[in-house]
């Protein structure tokens, strides 16, 4: 725990949090909020689907959409091609809907939200206050004088508890709210775009999500608008035996820009929990979306007990010409990760980028990567993936780069590097490359190595202890990706990289 | 687990056309292999391992007709002093072959090994193929073990003075051949194996190579130019301590070729290099599937595959380096590249790494693209005509793979073939 004591306590984080961190050791978000919850009965069936739809006060078409997805799901098989193994999931032994009792009456403003919930997010370092800067973030003091604003949508188990800065965003024409609210308030947008990037029948988990998603975030940026602040969603799983199924829909209309951040944590428990999210992004002409994730779900304890099963489908559709999407992810949590944020580069000259750091320690298993589907002319994509395995973990990069015959003069560059720390872990690379025209250039490079002894020796010689030295070398290894993150996230990610690897040396 | 119905039906239909040779002492191995086929089923279109190559015609009960082809060039390796073993449509031809005696090696037909009580052969036939079925299934190899009608067993105990050369002649438009060779290289022995010719309309070949500590085997192969031929070949190689295996394959034309190399490094400090160059024009589908397992310390493996494709030709590369737990100090390298000479051709690749040891240096690279315009411009500005410049750059592109052949005479023979192809196809 030596390194933990040295971890600087973030400004604005109270003593309670610091103590909590000490208690849980390496996973500092493992505590639980004691709050009265309301559950739907266990299991999934058409009645549960209807119940979720009803709880969200959804219109008839949405209920039908969900039921059709459920019907489809019953005919599908769980995928087994990923390099992960876990006990069979009993989909009927889960709660599909859990919300804090206090959320029964929808709070009209943040002031009405249950203080316990507010405290939860406060403790997580994500205060739901409309303040100038995201508190609890180191390095925030370097922010420009006028401050950086970040609007937050906070999702607690199955429901969104509140969204900040809604008024100010509204002035800019930006719609940022929970998806359940969007279904009620902006049905025309939801109807048009929902399921248009990730179809209902896309894959086992996406189909399940389509049937039972309970909440999530909705973003619409109107034409020509540069979103005045960063938007973020913070997902927290709190209830036991509950699956979280959130749905995010982001629409960037012509010439708009938005940067979107996503964070997630869950309490430390010894039973595994399911998280199956779907994120759909639609990017029109000349628009740009940056999507950054710091995924820090509970990874299970050092013996591989508990943790989150993270089965996520994320896809961006660059529909318009010159549209651009950038996925950045730091994956440190979850017992099992199955996640492939993808880009469909349909518009001419559209661009997709994917930067990823996946860290697996102890018994964690991560199978993650991306798909770059080049359909339009002059499309460009870049993939930089850094996988780090320690302990007894398995880390797999799985990706597809596809150049269609019509995607003339397109370009892809892929680099995936793996770092192994210890001789009981594994690092794997499974890229698929499909090139169907000759004016496109595709390059793929991958390396696997261990932490360089010379570099470690150099650091040790300069007086660092071994863990610090490893953290420094690993941070250097991840630099390409960390640099692509928004500032607040970069700082957090850098620390996460160090914390996740704690105890993996020696 | 029961097979899917489509697969079951296809497998049964194929087996109905086959008769297991009455092969005495290989009988047990053949029956085991048949059991494997029945359990796995033959490859189907939906199998992940056949994602980029359609196995239908390789699995069909009858071999699709393939017109005979008269190459207007001298037989490959013709000037070379070598021991020739000739097969016509998959049947050994004693008349056309040389005398099979050579110092340092013993050569027998598989069907004779029982009578001569050759222990090593009985311990090798079907064994490496069976080992090679995990973690990925190779049903066509098991089918071969069970039903191969002919084949040669080579025991290398010294350093023979000349290469042993398999020549596969294609004589009938409907021939469907299955050959199974086994080679055992004893400690400190060294041999060069050559293979060339189209073999048959449809050719299923399996070669099992066991190299003992310190043994060396060089392999150079050229698959015939017949446009309509089809081939599925497997080479299973096991390497002992400080042994060396170097294999190179040239593929020119052929409507469908799937070459699988399954290499297992089981002794420390062993070296395995597999390389391939293929050039395809038009209706050409070439698939290199390589699986290298590192199961010992300080071994080196290299995969170098280059493909030149035009007029709608398809090149496939599936390569994998598996480094098992404890196989420290592994040096694994893999490169697969394609040069697409026009917009209709395609390159499909799946270069994989699976690593369970930390002190390793493994890398793979894969690229695809057209001829470098700048290089072309440079050559043209120096007065080289476009066609020649393109050929020059194409040869340079293929050179890295051809350079894997250590023997200069052999690599020159391959370069001559490539130049011949380019003069005919540009």
Image (spheres, rainbow, N blue to C red):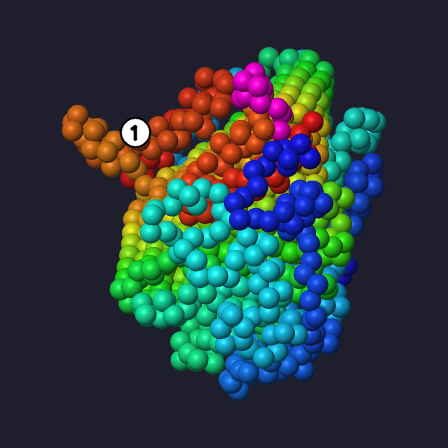
Q: Examine the rendering and report whether any part of residue B24 can be seen.
A: yes
Provide the secondary structure element on which disc 1 rests: helix
The correct choice, above or below, for A311 with respect to A2 in the image is below
Rendered image quadrant of residue A422: top right
Image quarter of residue B225: top left
Numbered circles on residues, count: 1
> Is A61 displayed left or right of B16 in the figure?
left
| Badge 1: chain ID | B
The residue at the point 52 percent across, 58 percent down is A127
User: Which is more toward the observer, B267 or B148?
Assistant: B267
Vertical placement of A148 versus B393: above or below?
Answer: below
Residue A211, horizontal then vertical, whole percent:
59, 74
Q: Residue A241: x percent and y percent?
A: 73, 64
A283 in magenta: no
The residue labelled by disc 1 is B392
Q: Is residue B178 above or below residue B214?
A: below
Residue B149, image x, y percentages = 69, 42
Q: Residue at x 43, y 27 (%)?
A: B400
- Whether residue B299 is visible to the viewer of this picture, yes or no, is no
User: Magenta stretch mostly in which secondary structure?
Assistant: helix
Closer-to-camera residue (A471/B238): A471
The residue closer to the viewer here, B46 or B202, is B46
Residue that appears at 48% across and 67% down = A163
What residue span does the magenta drawing correspond to?
A: A454-467
Between B188 and B293, the one nearer to me in the picture: B293
């Amino acid at each position: 725990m030596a390194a933990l004591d040295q971890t600087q306590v973030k400004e604005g984080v109270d003593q309670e949090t610091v103590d909590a961190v000490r208690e849980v050791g390496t996973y500092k978000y493992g505590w639980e909020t004691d709050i009265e919850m309301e559950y739907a009965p266990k299991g999934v069936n058409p009645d549960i689907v209807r119940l979720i739809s009803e709880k969200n006060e959804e219109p008839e078409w949405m209920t039908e959409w969900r039921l059709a997805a459920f019907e489809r799901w019953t005919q599908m098989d769980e995928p087994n091609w990923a390099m992960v193994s876990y006990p069979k999931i009993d989909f009927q032994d889960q709660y599909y809907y859990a919300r804090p009792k206090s959320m029964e009456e929808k709070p009209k403003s943040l002031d009405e939200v249950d203080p316990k919930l507010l405290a939860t997010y406060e403790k997580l370092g994500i205060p739901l206050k409309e303040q100038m800067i995201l508190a609890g973030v180191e390095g925030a003091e370097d922010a420009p004088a006028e401050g950086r604003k970040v609007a937050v949508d906070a999702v607690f188990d199955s429901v969104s508890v509140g969204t900040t800065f809604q008024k100010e965003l509204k002035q800019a024409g930006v719609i940022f709210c929970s998806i359940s609210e969007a279904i009620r308030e902006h049905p025309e947008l939801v109807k048009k775009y929902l399921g248009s990037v990730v179809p209902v029948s896309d894959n086992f988990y996406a189909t399940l999500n389509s049937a039972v998603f309970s909440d999530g975030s909705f973003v619409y940026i109107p034409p020509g608008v540069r979103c005045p602040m960063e938007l973020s969603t913070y997902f927290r799983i709190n209830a036991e035996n509950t699956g979280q199924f959130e749905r995010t829909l982001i629409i960037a209309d012509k010439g708009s820009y938005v940067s979107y951040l996503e964070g997630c944590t869950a309490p430390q428990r010894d039973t595994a929990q399911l998280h199956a999210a779907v994120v759909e992004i639609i990017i029109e002409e000349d628009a740009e979306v940056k999507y950054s994730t710091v995924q820090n779900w509970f990874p299970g304890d050092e013996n591989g007990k508990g943790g989150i099963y993270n089965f996520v489908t994320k896809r961006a559709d660059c529909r318009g010409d010159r549209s651009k999407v950038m996925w950045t992810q730091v994956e440190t949590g979850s017992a099992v990760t199955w996640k492939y944020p993808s880009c469909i580069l349909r518009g001419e000259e559209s661009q997709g980028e994917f930067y990823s750091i996946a860290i697996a320690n102890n018994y964690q298993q991560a199978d993650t990567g991306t798909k770059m589907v080049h359909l339009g002319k002059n499309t460009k994509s870049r993939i930089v993936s850094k996988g780090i395995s320690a302990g007894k973990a398995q880390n797999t990069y799985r990706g597809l780069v596809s150049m269609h015959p019509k995607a003339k003069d397109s370009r892809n560059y892929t680099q995936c590097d793996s770092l192994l720390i210890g001789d009981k872990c594994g690092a794997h690379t499974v890229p698929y490359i499909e090139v169907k025209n000759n004016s496109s250039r595709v390059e793929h490079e991958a390396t696997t190595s261990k932490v360089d002894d010379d570099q470690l020796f150099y650091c040790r010689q300069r007086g660092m202890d071994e863990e610090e030295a490893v953290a420094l070398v690993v941070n250097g290894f991840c630099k390409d990706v960390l640099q692509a993150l928004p500032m607040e996230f970069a700082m957090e990610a850098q620390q996460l990289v160090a914390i996740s690897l704690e105890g993996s040396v020696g | 687990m029961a097979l899917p119905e489509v697969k079951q039906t296809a497998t049964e239909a194929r087996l109905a056309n086959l008769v297991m040779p009455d092969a005495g002492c290989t009988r047990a191995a053949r029956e085991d292999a048949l059991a494997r086929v029945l359990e796995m089923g033959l490859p189907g279109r939906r199998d992940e391992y056949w994602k980029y190559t359609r196995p239908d015609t390789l699995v069909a009960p009858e071999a699709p007709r393939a017109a005979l082809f008269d190459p207007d060039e001298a037989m490959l390796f013709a000037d070379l002093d070598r021991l020739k073993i000739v097969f016509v449509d998959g049947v050994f031809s004693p008349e056309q072959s040389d005398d099979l005696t050579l110092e340092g090696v013993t050569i027998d037909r598989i069907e004779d090994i029982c009578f001569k009580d050759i222990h090593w052969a009985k311990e090798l036939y079907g064994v490496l193929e069976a080992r090679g079925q995990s973690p990925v299934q190779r049903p066509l190899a098991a089918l071969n073990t069970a039903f191969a009608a002919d084949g040669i067993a080579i025991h290398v105990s010294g350093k023979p003075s000349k290469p042993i050369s398999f020549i596969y002649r294609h004589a009938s438009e409907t021939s469907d051949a299955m050959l199974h060779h086994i080679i055992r290289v004893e400690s400190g022995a060294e041999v060069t194996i050559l293979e060339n010719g189209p073999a048959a309309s449809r050719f299923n070949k399996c070669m099992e190579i066991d190299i003992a500590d310190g043994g060396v085997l060089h392999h150079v192969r050229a698959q015939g130019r017949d446009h309509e031929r089809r081939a599925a070949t497997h080479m299973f190689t096991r390497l002992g301590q400080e042994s060396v295996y170097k294999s190179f394959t040239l593929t020119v034309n052929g409507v469908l070729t799937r070459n699988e190399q399954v290499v297992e490094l089981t002794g420390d400090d062993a070296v395995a290099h597999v390389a391939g160059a293929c050039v395809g024009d038009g209706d050409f589908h070439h698939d290199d599937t390589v699986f290298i397992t590192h199961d010992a310390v300080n071994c080196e493996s290299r995969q170098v595959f280059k493909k030149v494709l035009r007029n709608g030709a398809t090149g496939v590369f599936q390569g994998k380096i598996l480094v098992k737990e404890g196989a420290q100090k592994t040096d694994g390298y893999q490169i697969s590249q394609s040069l697409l000479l026009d917009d209709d051709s395609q390159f499909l690749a799946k270069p994989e790494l699976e690593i369970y040891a930390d002190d390793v240096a493994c890398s793979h690279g894969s690229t695809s693209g057209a001829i470098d315009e700048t290089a072309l411009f440079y050559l043209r500005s120096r007065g080289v005509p476009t066609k020649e410049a393109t050929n020059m750059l194409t040869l340079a592109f293929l050179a890295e793979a051809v350079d894997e052949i250590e023997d200069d005479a052999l690599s020159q023979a391959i370069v001559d073939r490539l130049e011949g192809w380019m003069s005919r196809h540009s």
